[in-house]
Amino acid sequence: MSNRKPKTKATAGLVSQRQLRASEMIRHALVEVMRENEVRDPALVGVSVTVTEVRLSPDLKHATCFVEPLGAGIETSDTAGHIDEIVKALNAHAKFLRGALGRHIDMRFTPDLRFRHDESFAAAERLNRLLDDPRVRADVAPPVEDDDA
């Protein structure tokens, strides 16, 4: 009798270990590519972009790259209010970046790149503001016991 588990179809939403390893490898390589190669676009001049996450399709042929321009959450920053332009410029140069990425990674196929703004930083900031609200703190604080009873 075999000790192997029967093969089942992958459930939607689950990411395989292979996808996770490949996406992390692509993220690191993409950071190197963006550091080494200057993309000539007016929207990207003087802009430092952080690649926060890469998500791969199950066949590893399409990669969604989540990016955050450095200083995007600071109102006085040069990138404030220009996030959509920066992401649009990255998507316009995705084929160039894909070609450079192909020279940095050892995969059968270099995935197509699609860039999106990473909204998780804004969501975390909203959550922190909510938790700092005095009304929420009152709900979270332990009840005060009355010693007079």
Image (spheres, grey):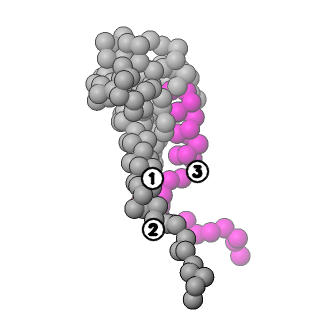
Q: Residues within 10 Å of mark 1 (few under 14, many from 20)?
A: few
- What is the span of residues highlighted in magenta in the rendered image? 1-30
Q: Residue at x 56, y 38 (%)?
A: 24
In front of the other: 35 or 139: 139
Calculate the distance from the C-alpha at mark 2 to the C-alpha at mark 3: 40 Å
* Mark 3 residue type: Gln
Does residue 92 appear left or right of residue 132 in this picture? Answer: left
Q: Residues within 10 Å of mark 3 (few under 14, many from 20)?
A: few
Tell which residue pokes out farthest to the bottom in this image.
149
Inspect this view and state whether residue 125 appears. Answer: yes
Determine the secondary structure under disc 2. helix
* Mark 2 residue type: Asp
Kindly check if marks 1 and 2 are in contact, taking CB atoms under 8 A apart as contact: no
Residue at which label 3 appears: 17
Determine the secondary structure under disc 3. helix
Q: Residue at x 43, y 27 (%)?
A: 71
Does residue 15 appear left or right of residue 75 in this picture? Answer: right
Calculate the distance from the C-alpha at mark 1 to the C-alpha at mark 2: 12 Å
Point out the image quarter for the N terminus: bottom right
Determine the secondary structure under disc 1. helix
* Mark 1 residue type: Asp
In front of the other: 65 or 113: 65
Residue at which label 2 appears: 139
Residue at which label 1 appears: 132
